[in-house]
Image (cartoon, grey):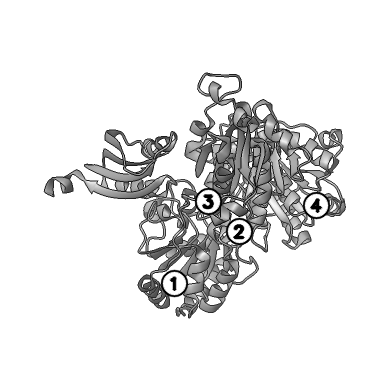
Amino acid sequence: MEQSKSVANMEMTGAKKVIETLKQLGVDTVFGYPGGAILPIYDALYQSGIRHILTRHEQAAIHAAEGYAKSTGRVGTVIATSGPGATNLVTGIADAYMDSVPLVVITGQVASPFIGTDAFQEVDVIGITAPVTKYSFQARTPEELPSLLAEAYQIASTGRPGPVLIDIPKDIASTHCMYQTSLPATKRIKQAISEIDTDQMEAIRQTISQAKRPLLYIGGGIVSGNASEELLRFVKETGIPVCSTLMGLGAYPPDEPLFLGMLGMHGTYAANMAVYHCDLLLAFGVRFDDRVTGKLERFSPQSTKIHIDIDPSELSKIVPVDYSLVCDVKTALQALLLPSPTPDCEEWRMQVQQWAQEYPLAYDQDQEGALKPQFVIDLLSKITNGNAIVTTEVGQHQMWAAHFYRAKKPRTFLTSGGLGTMGFGFPAAIGAQIAKPESTVVCIAGDASFQMNIQELQTIAELDIPVKVFIINNRFLGMVRQWQEMFYENRLSESQIGGPDFVKVAEAFRVKGLRAETMADAELVIQEALAHPGPVVVDFLVEESENVFPMVPPGKANSELIMKGWGG
Amino acid sequence: MNEQTIQMMVVNHPATFLRILGVYSRRGIQIDRMSINRADQQHLSNVRITVQCDSSMIDHLSKQLAKQVDVISVFKCSTYDKNNV
């Protein structure tokens, strides 16, 4: 009662209150695309002080919001209209759900009396997105809008992060209503349990101390849990070698001697041999994805497994584990460091380092020959010293980026891991650049992936967003072709894919376009692109038949990886 | 394959069962029996869902259900146990 006296009331529309609440929640940037049912919100957004990034397709808006969220750890916000606006977001929502990206998605909806009547631009967006959202709300009254928004941001960003959708019918946004000026308290939030069972922790410490061949298998949980520093200390103090999933790249410094690189289907020899032969697997912030495990029955067959994850439903979901903690990895590592267990594993360290030296990631770049895709990415990594923010599209170039771009810091290697969304990388780079205007942001793209959201050239041109797009152009859906060569008797069904003259396309959008066809070109062009203050598209015409190795073929164990080219 | 029952307390609103039933349908589990009863408190309901599946699947389902924002509590109770009470 005391409080309500001091709280001022003010009359405004629901839409105006949405924008006011966003500001109170600290939202300064949103990505979106206007349309009929969301008009009241866009009207309230006008000159509101919140920066709105207008993309050229709703899918790009949501991937940009993902890039913003992944590069900062903050919640990304996206706004779209009802019907097709909402359905165009679905791929991005699913992508964010799979990779645990915190997003709040605001969709317009037809006016309440028309919901369920097949009205113009009406879809049941709550129904369509339920399986791929952490939670969703449909506003029923204008009064509840502030509390729904506050809850949405809290749900999206706490526990295992994920996308939350708020559907706002047009009449709810247009209605005038009396609002309190203060931000409402949130309710019905499930907090993740971060209380550590000390007996369990002691058992884990004992198990680590006794291990002879321990291995850390780290993933996206280290990045989203901001646990990189603790991880580095833990490795320094225990001497346990580290391998990472695709989502964990950047969480551990790649130049540290105990880092074995990525494991799994296109993982390094050392990482895959280590995971197969270890006697203790420390699975921290990971989910035993099928691209990591290979044949499940033969995944890390000799190891005791310790799994730490914030999401209890991940524990023993795929692989039964011996010890588990439901906890954010940072808290768990802090507890494990008091004091660190010290396993006697010198022999094992020598063994894994020998594997790493014997079979490093490699490629053959002939001085006079065609440009190799790996060389381009390796060169980018060297020139930027791994300090740029890199986004990728999906396919062969993504795996080469994982191999040869040595991201030094967390939140600087942004890729679509779980859903594998072609079209993610370019808009994600836009979002990352908006969040980090001082950083160099490079999208490593494939020629086919880039064509999936190529219209965003207009966005970067108009807003002068200095993203650099490096197209690894092999004139193929390279990963599809690789599988056709290896597993479909070389029947290249629809995998040869044409593209435009990317330099001319860029220039038509008033974006600088460059091309490289040789080693010498590549170095000059990378330097020129990175030095240019505005956006650049670079078309690297690379060897078209190159394939990604090592490879653990589907249905095989991690130890059965293929090292060299197929059939050669 | 055994008859397995999960009992839950949920916040009941129009989209609650869209999410709860989605946990079952995604795993290809058919629902044999289901009851929903409004609890004394407003918006809360008691739910019982009975299916045929093995014990590892019911563990997985109950973890997935417990994770739902609208689910307040989850209890596994097999029909066998109930008959013994």
Q: Is residue A367 above or below residue A258?
A: above
Circles 2 and 3: CB atoms closer than 8 Å:
no
Q: Amino acid at mark 4?
A: Met
Q: Is residue A508 visible?
A: yes
In percent of width and height, residue A272 lies at 50, 59
Type of amino acid under label 3: Thr
The chain to which mark 4 is attached is: A
Q: Residues within 10 Å of mark 3 (few under 14, many from 20)?
A: some
Label 2: which secondary element: loop
**Position of residue A563 measured from the top left corner of the image (x, y, whole percent):** 56, 54
Secondary element under disc 4, as helix, strand or loop, is helix
Q: Are marks 2 and 3 on the same chain?
A: yes
Q: Disc 1 marks which residue?
A: A213
Question: For the residues tagged 2 and 1, is the chain the same?
Answer: yes
Residue A174: x and y in percent read 65, 30
Residue positioned 53% across, 58% down in the render: A221
Real-space Cα separation, disc 3 to disc 4, in angstroms: 57 Å
Identity of the amino acid at label 1? Arg
